[in-house]
Amino acid sequence: MTLHKLLYWPHLICGVLAGVLILIMSVTGVLLTYERQIIAWAETEFNSSVPVNGDALPIDDLINMNSAIFGDTNLRSVKIENRPDAPIVVRGNDYFYIDQYTGENLGNGPTGVKKFMSDLRSVHRWLAMEGENRATARIFTGAANLMFLFIVISGMYLWIPKVINWKNIKKILFFRKTKSSRARDFNWHNVLGIWSAIPLIVVVATATVFYYTWANNLVYILAGEEPPVRGGTTSIDNAAVFDQMVPFDSMFEKAKLQSENWTSITMTYPKTTDENVRFSVDTGNGGEPHKKGELYLSRANGEITEWQSFDDYSAGRQARNYIRFLHTGEALGVIGQTIAGLVSLFSTVMVWTGLALAYRKYIKPLIKSKNKKHQNRNIITEQ
């Protein structure tokens, strides 16, 4: 058996078995391409009203003014953006958008858009299943993702024509006029496959890390590090309760000094037992991990206890952070997002044409043969 045949049959079988799931993940992937930009556009409705004269209120005052709205919610984060009309976004069980100049609660943000995107992600990751069914769905979507990776890699070899010359390569490398739907599907399947193969391998391979612990650990092992222990608990020797001695506003001002080009700063709201307050300082669009850093300030005196830029991270942590945003293309900016979205779109066409080719080549002849036998029996019976 030749290598071509050895790869062809698993390629075909994986495509047929996982085709529907790959199609679902590809379609939802296309719809999620510009999720960050769509949400940002929808959030403009909740901007602060910039006064002619006046400064923004201190963060602490804004939080205290809205304490009744937060209720008994345990606050999770406070985010500011480096633009005059940006609201202060406080996250508890919900998001609260607060005018930074008046303290007015502007609402919970574009909840409809966010829910739509959240539902799409749920379908994309685990077919919108909930509870125990979610783990089961992840088994199927994870397996389909692995099969898709094999399909793309094996397809790169299967694409190579038997006789390698420019005439044969050109037939598969570019779109061309065809005389039948089968020839058209074959042409589209190959053209889209070969042009999207490399970025598609990146998109699919990075998704494997989200599905499987062994894949996540492999990232650190290849970087020469021990994989971190997930779900580990840290014992607290000092169970003292720390009062807030330094205002949050002063801490945010110190966080701003870490970079003149900061675009957003997010504070993880401290627990009563936290000695330090964590700030994430971003100089990018939110999806570029190499433009983020982590700052820890002492809760007692506001001094810096630790600052880590992306360059300070270990090689394994850098790779893992990059992988998260390489999957969506965001790590490479809008161009990367666009490429990821396009190859997701191409993969929907490849799934459709691949299934169509399999149907015409293997299923349709069986149906015709069965119908012909049935007709022959009827003729014999009538005679």
Image (tube, rainbow, N blue to C red):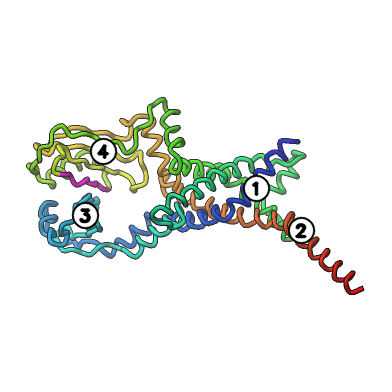
Instruction: Give the structural element (helix, strand or loop) at label 4.
Output: strand
Identify the residue at image location x=30%, y=36%: 232
Q: Nearer the viewer, mark 3 or mark 1?
A: 1
Q: Which residue is mark 4?
A: 294
Question: Which x, y percent locates residue 16?
Answer: 63, 52
Instruction: Give the structural element (helix, strand or loop) at label 2.
Output: helix
Answer yes or no: do the residues labelled 3 and 2 have beta carbons within 8 Å?
A: no
Q: Earlier in the sequence, mark 3 or mark 1?
A: 1
Q: Nearer the viewer, mark 3 or mark 2?
A: 2
Q: Earlier in the sequence, mark 3 or mark 2?
A: 3
Badge 2 amino acid: Leu
Q: Which residues are magenta?
A: 264-271
Q: Earlier in the sequence, mark 1 or mark 4?
A: 1
Q: Nearer the viewer, residue 375 or 358?
A: 375
Q: Which residue is mark 2?
A: 366
Within 10 angstroms of label 3, few (less than 14), some, or many (20 or more) residues? many
- Quarter holding the C terminus? bottom right
Q: Earlier in the sequence, mark 1 or mark 2?
A: 1
Rounded to the nearest angstrom, the CA distance separating label 4 from label 2 is 62 Å
Q: Which residue is mark 1?
A: 13
Hey, which quadrant is residue 52 in on the image?
A: bottom left
Within 10 angstroms of label 2, few (less than 14), some, or many (20 or more) residues? few
Q: Nearer the viewer, mark 1 or mark 4?
A: 1
Identify the residue at image location x=31%, y=63%: 111
Image vertical order of residue 306 relative to residue 335, above or below? above
Q: Which mark is residue 90?
A: 3
Question: Which x, y percent locates residue 133?
Answer: 43, 54
